[in-house]
Image (tube, rainbow, N blue to C red):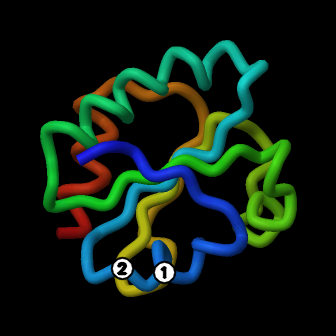
Protein backbone atom coordinates (compact mmCIF):
# COMPACT_ATOMS: atom_id res chain seq x y z
CA UNK A 1 0.00 0.00 0.00
CA UNK A 2 1.27 3.48 -0.74
CA UNK A 3 1.39 6.52 1.51
CA UNK A 4 -1.80 8.56 1.44
CA UNK A 5 -1.58 12.33 1.15
CA UNK A 6 -3.85 13.89 3.76
CA UNK A 7 -5.59 17.28 3.78
CA UNK A 8 -8.50 18.72 5.71
CA UNK A 9 -10.99 17.30 3.18
CA UNK A 10 -9.99 13.64 3.65
CA UNK A 11 -8.60 13.78 7.19
CA UNK A 12 -11.72 12.53 8.98
CA UNK A 13 -11.81 9.33 6.92
CA UNK A 14 -8.14 8.73 7.74
CA UNK A 15 -8.56 9.55 11.43
CA UNK A 16 -11.53 7.21 11.74
CA UNK A 17 -9.88 4.32 9.90
CA UNK A 18 -10.35 0.81 11.28
CA UNK A 19 -6.59 0.40 10.93
CA UNK A 20 -3.88 1.85 13.16
CA UNK A 21 -2.79 5.08 11.45
CA UNK A 22 0.71 6.52 11.11
CA UNK A 23 0.66 10.24 10.31
CA UNK A 24 3.88 11.90 9.14
CA UNK A 25 3.68 15.69 9.56
CA UNK A 26 6.34 17.13 7.22
CA UNK A 27 7.39 19.95 4.91
CA UNK A 28 9.16 19.69 1.55
CA UNK A 29 11.97 22.03 2.69
CA UNK A 30 12.73 20.05 5.88
CA UNK A 31 15.95 17.98 5.74
CA UNK A 32 15.06 15.53 8.53
CA UNK A 33 11.62 15.08 6.91
CA UNK A 34 13.33 14.03 3.67
CA UNK A 35 15.37 11.49 5.68
CA UNK A 36 12.20 9.97 7.19
CA UNK A 37 10.18 9.95 3.93
CA UNK A 38 11.70 6.78 2.40
CA UNK A 39 11.32 4.96 5.73
CA UNK A 40 7.64 5.92 5.91
CA UNK A 41 7.20 4.77 2.28
CA UNK A 42 8.86 1.45 3.09
CA UNK A 43 6.65 0.91 6.15
CA UNK A 44 3.55 1.59 4.01
CA UNK A 45 4.69 -0.91 1.36
CA UNK A 46 5.60 -3.66 3.82
CA UNK A 47 2.74 -3.27 6.32
CA UNK A 48 -0.71 -3.20 4.69
CA UNK A 49 -2.28 -3.66 8.14
CA UNK A 50 -1.51 0.02 8.83
CA UNK A 51 -2.81 3.16 7.15
CA UNK A 52 0.21 5.37 6.48
CA UNK A 53 -0.41 9.01 5.62
CA UNK A 54 1.54 12.25 5.22
CA UNK A 55 0.39 15.75 6.16
CA UNK A 56 2.22 18.71 4.59
CA UNK A 57 2.24 21.31 7.37
CA UNK A 58 2.69 24.20 4.92
CA UNK A 59 -0.47 23.20 3.03
CA UNK A 60 -2.45 22.13 6.12
CA UNK A 61 -1.49 24.40 9.03
CA UNK A 62 -4.85 23.84 10.73
CA UNK A 63 -4.19 20.09 11.00
CA UNK A 64 -0.69 20.72 12.35
CA UNK A 65 -2.09 23.13 14.92
CA UNK A 66 -4.91 20.77 15.93
CA UNK A 67 -2.35 18.06 16.74
CA UNK A 68 0.14 20.33 18.46
CA UNK A 69 2.82 19.95 15.81
CA UNK A 70 5.47 22.56 16.59
CA UNK A 71 8.49 20.79 15.12
CA UNK A 72 8.84 18.55 12.08
CA UNK A 73 8.99 15.76 11.31
CA UNK A 74 6.36 14.73 13.83
CA UNK A 75 5.07 11.17 13.67
CA UNK A 76 1.70 10.45 15.24
CA UNK A 77 0.13 7.02 15.70
CA UNK A 78 -3.66 7.07 15.92
CA UNK A 79 -5.95 4.29 17.05
CA UNK A 80 -9.75 4.58 17.00
CA UNK A 81 -9.53 8.29 16.12
CA UNK A 82 -7.33 9.14 19.12
CA UNK A 83 -3.63 9.99 19.33
CA UNK A 84 -1.92 6.94 20.82
CA UNK A 85 1.70 8.05 20.43
CA UNK A 86 3.67 11.02 19.18
CA UNK A 87 7.36 11.33 18.30
CA UNK A 88 9.24 14.42 17.17
CA UNK A 89 12.28 14.27 14.90
CA UNK A 90 13.72 11.73 12.49
CA UNK A 91 13.39 8.20 13.82
CA UNK A 92 14.82 4.89 12.56
CA UNK A 93 12.49 2.36 10.97
CA UNK A 94 12.61 0.00 13.97
CA UNK A 95 11.48 2.75 16.34
CA UNK A 96 8.58 3.78 14.07
CA UNK A 97 7.47 0.15 13.71
CA UNK A 98 7.65 -0.26 17.48
CA UNK A 99 5.31 2.73 17.90
CA UNK A 100 2.82 1.08 15.54
CA UNK A 101 3.11 -2.40 17.05
CA UNK A 102 2.46 -1.07 20.56
CA UNK A 103 -0.95 0.09 19.35
CA UNK A 104 -2.02 -2.95 17.37
Whether the residues at callouts 1 and 2 have beta carbons within 8 Å, the answer is yes
- List x then y, in percent, for residue 4: 45, 52
- List x then y, in percent, for residue 48: 15, 54
Q: Residue at x 31, y 52 (%)?
A: 99
Q: Is residue 75 above or below residue 51?
A: above
- List x then y, in percent, for residue 38: 39, 21
Q: Residue at x 43, y 85 (%)?
A: 16
Q: Is residue 64 above or below residue 8?
A: above
Q: Nearer the viewer, residue 25 or 91?
A: 25
Secondary structure beneath disc 2? Answer: loop
Q: Is residue 101 left or right of residue 70?
A: left
Name the mark on residue 13.
Answer: 1
State the CA–CA distance, disc 1 to disc 2: 6 Å
Q: Is residue 76 left or right of residue 22?
A: right
Q: Residue at x 53, y 45 (%)?
A: 24
Q: Is residue 62 above or below residue 95?
A: below
Number of numbered callouts drawn: 2
Q: Is residue 16 above or below residue 103?
A: below
Q: Quadrant of residue 92?
A: top left
Secondary structure beneath disc 1? Answer: helix
Q: Is residue 101 left or right of residue 69?
A: left
Q: Residue at x 32, y 43 (%)?
A: 2
- List x then y, in percent, for residue 56: 70, 44
Q: Which residue is mark 2?
A: 17
Which image quadrant: the C terminus?
A: bottom left
Name the mark on residue 57.
Answer: none
Q: Nearer the viewer, residue 12 or 9?
A: 9
Amino acid sequence: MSVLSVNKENFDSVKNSEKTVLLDFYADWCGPCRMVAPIVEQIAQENPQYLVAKVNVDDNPELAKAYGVVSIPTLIVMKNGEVAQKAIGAKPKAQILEMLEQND
